[in-house]
Image (cartoon, grey):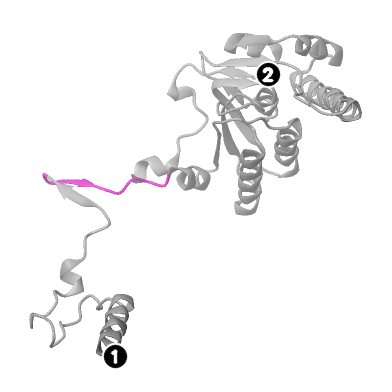
Amino acid sequence: MAAFALTVVSALALVAPPARLGAPASRAGRGVPARPMAAARVAMGAINIDGVRIGPPPDLPSLLLHNRIVYVGTGLVPQVAELIVAQLLYIQFDSGDKPYFMYINSPGTASQDGMTGFETDAFAIADTMRYIRPEAQTICLGMAYGTAAMLLASGARGKRAMLPNAVAMLHQPRSRTQGQASDISLRAKEVLYNRRVLASLLAERCGRQLGTVEEDMGRTKYLTAEECKAYGLVDTVLQSDASLPAVPTFMNKL
């Protein structure tokens, strides 16, 4: 019986809550009061190293969104499209009069980790860009492939730009459907419909004939920054940071 009582006491000791920081030690302890919490706290803000103030790392996504900057830096898979649409709606709620900036470096509906998005994800972003009142200033850095090129062209006319070494690519929607013949037939109809919608959006934004765009999309077509300007995807090729449309205000606060 004594052994059982000892076991119960040991178990209660294991699940008992730890002593509160800053409270004095119990009489059963060493008799030395615990160190006050204020003196033991580790500073979580800025620190000084050799007299130089170094702050904590900034929350870049929040800072960018606060300054009305949307960065599309990955494939347009459903999770990414959902986040971008939410950011655009927030920008509309924050201020319906100020423009916003969309920086694009995206392979379109494909991503490097093998995930594949749907053209409808990109269409949702494009429709939201039209739905909200603030105008979009789009800037491509790196690449804008497929549906990402369509988003680049969806910016406000006169405010679509590319960096000198950025590349765009036009191609038609792809399908990896497997299964019964009826399923493949349905997917083929959807691909043809999405191809038509994508070509229509590009033709409208680039000021070109629909047939011309459909022909260019028939096979993969790469365009340099200057070729994109001639094609109508963008209006300007940025040569230096002095020609950028805006300087983020948060840079002065870091």
> Residue farthest to the front?
1
Side of 114 where 186 appears, left or right: right
Which residue carries the number 1 mark?
1
Please tell me whether mark 2 sits on a helix, a strand or a loop: loop
The image position of residue 233, as x and y in percent, is: 68, 18
Dominant SS in magenta? loop
The image position of residue 26, as x and y in percent, is: 16, 85
Residue visible at 64% across and 13% down? Answer: 229
Residue 24 within the segment the image draws in magenta = no
**Nearer to me, 153 or 169:** 169
The image position of residue 212, as x and y in percent, is: 82, 10
Residue visible at 30% across and 49% down? Answer: 56
Q: Looking at the rendering, in which quadrant would you find the N terminus?
A: bottom left
The image position of residue 243, as x and y in percent, is: 49, 23
Highlighted magenta segment, given as a residue range = 50-59
Side of 168 where 150 appears, left or right: right
Side of 123 where 49 appears, left or right: left
Q: Looking at the rendering, in which quadrant would you find the C terminus?
A: top left
Using a 10 Å C-alpha cutoff, classify the residue at mark 1 as few (fewer than 14 neighbours), some (14 to 19) or many (20 or more). few
Look at the numbered discs 2 and 1 and tell me whether their residues touch, using CB distance below 8 Å. Answer: no
Q: Nearer the viewer, mark 2 or mark 1?
A: 1
The quadrant in which residue 145 appears is top right
Amino acid type assigned to the residue bearing label 1 in the image = Met
Using a 10 Å C-alpha cutoff, classify the residue at mark 2 as few (fewer than 14 neighbours), some (14 to 19) or many (20 or more). many
The quadrant in which residue 81 appears is top right
As drawn, the label of residue 233 is 2
For marks 2 and 1, the one nearer the N-term is 1
> Residue farthest to the bottom?
1
Residue visible at 61% across and 23% down? Answer: 107
Please tell me whether mark 1 sits on a helix, a strand or a loop: loop
